[in-house]
Amino acid sequence: MQTGSTPTTDTFTAGASGLGSVYLSKKAVAGTVAIASYATPAGAAPPPAFSYLDGSNEVVFPVPLPPGARIAISYIGLGYSNNQIAQRYQTGVRINQQFAGLPGAEVGLTFHRLWDENLPQGTTPGAVDLGVNAYPAGVFGAVSDTVFGLDFQAPLAFVRATAANTPLLFGEVSGSRWTPAQQFVAETGAYAGVAGLKLTFARTQMTLQYQSVGTNYLDGAPVRFFGNAPPTWANYQGDFYPQFFGFANTLGINQTFDASINAGAPGRSATAANPALTFIYPVFNPFVASGPDFYSAFAPNTQGPSFTLLAPLRIAGLAIDGRLFAQHLSELQANANSTSTFGPQFPSAVRATFDKLDAGATFAIGKVAVNLAGTLEHLKRNDTSGYTYIPYNPATASADPGALANFQAAAGSSSVVYYPNYVNLYHTMLAAGASLPVSRDVVLNTRYSDQRYFGSYGTTLQQNIGGTKDQVDLGLTYTVPKTSSSVGLTFRNSTYKDAALSSYNLSASREDVNFTIRF
């Protein structure tokens, strides 16, 4: 459900160079943006034509407003109370069939439907009328998504040694039809398939799996920002929110640019020292979907195998439950993240790949339960297509005028190239956790993790990523006697340190009290 706050009006005045677009102070509900008043230096004038870009919360004027013009824009800001705008519904059905004569065999059908109701048709003259100001074409409107799936598992009894060790074949096929704006955007369809084999040897379990998920497969709703989109996401048109995968920076490429300019005129260019031009920017992993608006276990446009091993071990009398997970994925179609993030001016024909290796162990030392984990991830796209580099200012969403002037004055002596589609990023994580019951009703737990990011993304072929994230969790859980209800107290501290730009270092703490009541 989308809800609006009280109506808001923003006023803007065109400067000496005119006014081509403005960003609203609050996130506007699509369909509620209207011109409240408009005047030029000569006096009141008819409202100008405009377009509202929902993704960046921006109002664009096809014909820039003249210098000195003053315009007031009214809209309903996105919030959590008052003025209900659109209602969202979802429903799901699951049917599972077992077979008496085939122990372990199952067939299942799954149906999921998510949709928004259309905006109400209003008739109030002169008001912010949701019927007249309906969702414009090309932006988010009434979402519609329908998913139907068929899955099965079948024991391969003819190759079993014992009933407990029978190999199990499993698979699923699913189809999705969705549109982010049912009123204006035609539905697209895609299919997804997963197949695998589970093997058991004594107490060791292995799972081999292969997945292929279509480029337009979606089970959920598209991403929507509850505020002005970050600069690197202003043009994002993807179907889902990929996983955060660290920060890259522009320090190295700006140092190269300065050196190129200053070779002909020493000291003229200092973009590397300008905090408006030298910054960190987020990197995302398109192979992993995450976020509250995406429900699928698999990200679109991915294919490849994975392997899982669960094995009990005994070392020096210590019983250990070990696990190992390995995965290799590639895109079905080349779909550079920079293309969807920064716009279609950076196309790529090179498919990205993603490799992951995850290992862990769980064991007990006396009453203390211990969990250890380690992860190595590698995201890669070997696209070395180069583009001429001019330092960019995200605050103005344009090239820096001073840097552009220096580049033009260099008369071709500067030939700095950057590579927006090149990716060679590594992520590692080491984590350890422990829990200790101090009484029948009280359990203490703690966890520490260390994550490191390094590699290159989006600017140079050399390293421009270097960051460390540490996190400490402390918790206490109290179970109410003679009930299954509990109270949990947790404390978390997260610290990020950037190897290139220390001004972005941060440390944040969080405390929670959680009540769990079961009847």
Image (spheres, rainbow, N blue to C red):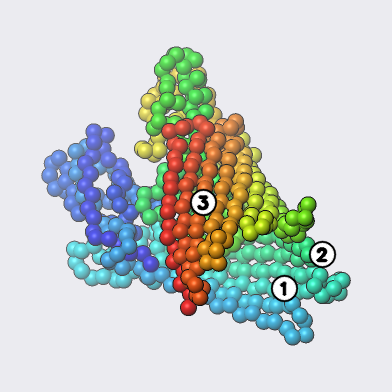
> Label 2 to label 3, Cα distance in Å?
37 Å
SS for dot 3: strand
Which quarter of the figure has residue 103? Answer: bottom right
What's the distance in space between the residues labelled 3 and 1, CA to CA?
39 Å
Asked if 68 appears above or below 240 in the picture, the reply is above
> Could you tell which of marks 3 and 1 lies nearer the N-terminus?
1
Question: Image quadrant for the N terminus?
Answer: bottom left
Which numbered mark, 3 or 1, is in the foreground of this view? 3
Q: How crowded is mark 2: few (under 14 residues within 10 Å), some or many (20 or more)?
A: some
Q: What element carries label 1?
A: strand
Per the rendering, the mark at residue 201 is 2
Helix, strand or loop status at disc 2: strand
Measuring 35% from the left and 62% from the top, which residue is drawn there?
Answer: 135
Instruction: Tell me residue 217's x, y (percent).
Output: 57, 62
* Label whose residue precedes the other's in the sequence (2 or 3): 2
Q: Where is residue 180 in the image (x, y as percent from the top left)?
A: 45, 62
Q: Measure how far apart labels 2 and 1 are at the Cα level.
A: 19 Å
What numbered label is drawn on residue 312? none
Residue 312 percent across, percent down from the top left:
75, 59
Between 209 and 16, the one nearer to me in the picture: 209
Q: Name the residue under label 3.
A: 473
Q: In this view, does 312 lie to the left or right of 442?
A: right
Residue type indicated by callout 2: Phe
Query: Would you identify the image quadrant in which residue 177 lies?
Result: bottom right
The residue carrying mark 1 is 153
Specify the amino acid type for callout 1. Answer: Gln
Q: How crowded is mark 1: few (under 14 residues within 10 Å), some or many (20 or more)?
A: many
Residue 323: % across, % down: 71, 56
